[in-house]
Amino acid sequence: MAHEQSGELACAYGTCRTIARREAKNFYYAFIALPIARRNAICAIYAFMRQADDLADDESLPREERRQKLNAWLTAWHATARGARTTDPVFLAVRDATRRFDIPLELLNELVEGVAMDLDHATGSEPDTYATFDDLYRYCYLVASVVGLVTIRIFGSSDGRAEKLAEETGIAFQLTNILRDVSEDAARNRVYLPLTDLAAHGVSLDSVLRRAPSAPPTAAERALLASIARRAEDYYRSADALLPLIDRESRPALWVLVSIYHALLKRIERADYDVFTRRASVPTAQKLAILLIGLARMAWARITT
C-alpha cells in the first residue's frame, strides 16, 4: 500500500512538473536549478496557483460564476489538506509539499485571496483600478509576496530577516509584471498603475484604457512608467540581500529567478518604457545563459558542501 501511495505521489509530482514546464516560462528556468525534492515542491505550488488563476481568469464565464467555481475548488482543497482522499494530482502533491516543507496553509489561502481580488474588485463595466500605491501593494503582496514566503520555506532559510526580504522581492517581481502587461491588462479593463500616480503625471485613466495599440507612449506616460520602475528597482535590492540568507543548495535557483526578472525590467527601461507597441520579454538565449550559470553554481554548492 505504501508503495502504491508513493507511486501515486510520484505521478502527482510529475503532473505538476509538466504544468510548470508548459506554463511557468521565467519561473521554470529557476526550478531546474533546484535539487529534485525542492523542485517537485515548487512545481506543485506553481501548479496550484495555475489552477486558481485559470478558474479566476476564465472570461467565458460571468464573474460571479467564476467566484463560485473558485470557492468550490478552495473547499475541495481544504478537505484534501485535512486528509481527505483526492483524485486531483495537484492537490495530492501540494498536500505532501506543505507537510514536507512546513508551509502554513494560511499562506495558500492568501494566494487564492489574491487571485480572487480581480473577481471582487470591480463590477459591471467599471475598470479594475487601485487608488494608491498602498492599495496596489496589498494586491502585489497577495499575488506575489505570498509566493515568496512559500518559496523561502521550500528553498530553506533559518534567518528571520528572510521573510520581509522575500515579501519585498515579490513586490519587485509583480511591479515588473505590471509594467510589462500594461497594454494587455488595459484590454481586459484592468489598470494596475495607481490612480494617484496617474494623476501626479498628468495621465488620464481613459487614455490608458482607450489608447491606439500602435501608439508609442507619450512623455507623460514614460515618466509614469519610469516612476514604477524606480520603485521596482528599490525592491530588487531586497532580493540581493535575501540571497545569502537562503540555503546554499537553493541559492542558484533564487539567483536565476531574480536575474531573469531583473533582466526583464532592464529591457523595459532600455526600451524607454514602450510597453504599448511591443511586449517586453527576455530572449530565450539570455535565459538559457543565466540558467547555465545557475546550474554551475548548483554543482559547485554540492561539491563544496
Image: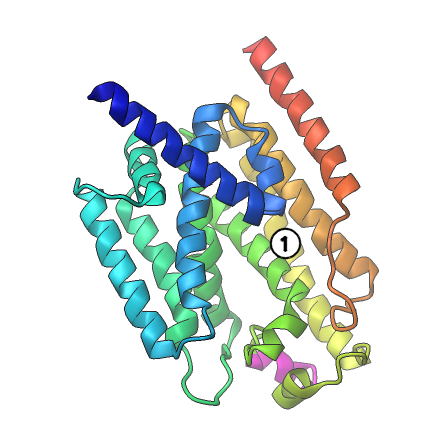
Q: Is residue 294 above or below residue 93?
A: above
- Which of the 4 quarters of the picture holds residue 84? top left
Report whether residue 161 is seen.
no
Numbered disc 1: secondary structure = helix
* Horizontal arrangement in the rendering, residue 76 relative to residue 279 (left or right): left
Q: Is residue 258 magenta?
A: no
Question: Residue 194: in sight, yes or no?
Answer: yes
Vertical placement of 117 versus 242: above or below?
below
Residue lying at 39% horizontally and 74% vertically, measured from the top left:
119
Residue at image point 76% right, 60% down = 268
Task: Residue at 33% x, 25% y: name it.
Answer: 7
Q: Is residue 248 left or right of residue 225?
A: left
Compare residues 182 and 184 and report the one nearer the observer: 184
How many numbered circles are shown? 1
Circle 1 residues within 10 Å: few <14, some 14–19, many ≥20: some
Pick the quarter of the image with the N terminus: top left
Q: Determine whether 251 is above or below 121 in the image.
A: above
Percent across and percent down for residue 248 are 53, 22
Q: Which residues are magenta?
A: 195-203
Secondary structure character of the magenta stretch overall: helix
Residue designated by label 1: 234
* Protein image colouring: rainbow
Q: Position of residue 94 (x, y in %)?
A: 34, 40
The answer to which quarter of the image holds residue 92 is top left
Question: Picture coordinates of residue 116 (x, y %)?
Answer: 37, 67
Please state, as top left, top right, bottom left or bottom right, where the C terminus lies in the image: top right
For this rendering, which residue is in front, 60 or 175?
60
Quadrant in the picture for residue 296: top right
Amino acid carrying mark 1 in the image: Asp
